[in-house]
Image: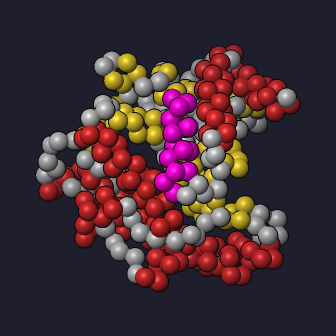
Amino acid sequence: YSEYADFCFATFGDRVKNWTTINEPRPIASLGYDVGSFAPGRCSKAIFNCSAGDSATEPYIVSHNLLLAHAAAVHIYRTKYQEKQKGRIGILLDFLWYEPLTRGKADNYAAQRARDFHIGWFLHPLVYGEYPRTMREIAGERLPKFTAEEATTVKGSFDFVGINQYTAYYVSNETKETPKEMTSYQADWKAKFSFAKNGVPIGQTIPSSVWIIDVPWGLYKCLMYVKEKYGNPTVILSENGMEEPANVTLPKALHDTTRIRYYKGYLRQLKKAVDDGANVVGYYIWSLLDNFEWATGYDSRFGIVFVDRRDSRLKRYLKMSAYWFKKLLQR
């Protein structure tokens, strides 16, 4: 990976001024090695009947190596290229907001564990040179340790942090003991997730999505959490958006008022976070075009531009949300 990064810096650095090493390393480790739903499809047999893997250890090993690879690339860029090329380098991390289901101490602790095992898994080492204390206590020897040299290399190895943020969930404490054969990264959270409290959704539901709920205040809390817990790093909101189904008529797809409502709410909360001191310097929607999603392929449409996949030229049509953004940016 270091050789690959070096080649990219040398070849494209005269034009590229914003580098990211890895996009969403947490899903790479968790979905690929904990539940086996992403490549290479590894997990414990008792978890999701994978043919090979160990959900108790492999996600942690993979994430550890991803952090070391990231830090190695940043070291190369800073020592060989940054002074001349005048660019900056960071990493993109996914982060959902976890809100305690109740005011009880157990649920508050569960929500904090969820944050530690999610964003803290990567951002804590990048800022402090070690994994969160909760992870070290729960995973124990299953969690790799940084050598003193590795910790020094990883700590501070970013000029900015990209945050991919979409939604928020309620979290409550998991009281059931995990059977040994079911030990996994996700089980280590000791948390349960829900979209509603006492039958009331955490936010505006999006019928076409099984995982995104419109919860703008979750974005605000994510950004303020990163500000307060991790020393207010430079942040780029690198992904934010919602999906709609692919099997709708063109007129209905273009009339995407739900998406406009979503972006209005999230941009208001982004401004509020910036006004309250969050060091956010950039914002990217997900996405410009209807794209191929790793989990759902072409069945979801995230774009503000419709792509007609039945047309041999893949003709594009601006959705109402694209015109809304155009008007917003012209103001």
Q: Is residue 137 above or below residue 222?
A: below
- In front of the other: 155 or 248: 155
Residue 212 shows in the view: yes
Q: Is residue 39 visible?
A: no
In the rendered image, which quarter is residue 7 located in?
A: bottom right
| Residue drawn 76% across the image and 67% down it | 87
Look at 31% across and 58% down and name the residue there.
134
Q: Is residue 242 left or right of residue 322?
A: left
> Which percent across, then down, holds residue 330?
86, 31
Residue 137 in picture, x, y percent from top left: 26, 62
Q: Is residue 1 above or below residue 53?
A: below
Question: Would you identify the image quadrant in which residue 60 lies?
Answer: bottom left
Residue 185 lies, with reference to residue 192, above or below; the image says below
Q: Residue furthest front?
A: 276
Quadrant holding the C terminus: top right
Q: Residue at x 26, y 40 (%)?
A: 105
Nearer to me, 25 or 74: 74
* Stretch of the chain drawn in magenta: 215-230
Above or below — where is 154 with respect to 284? below
Q: Residue at x 25, y 59 (%)?
A: 138
Say whether residue 273 is magenta: no
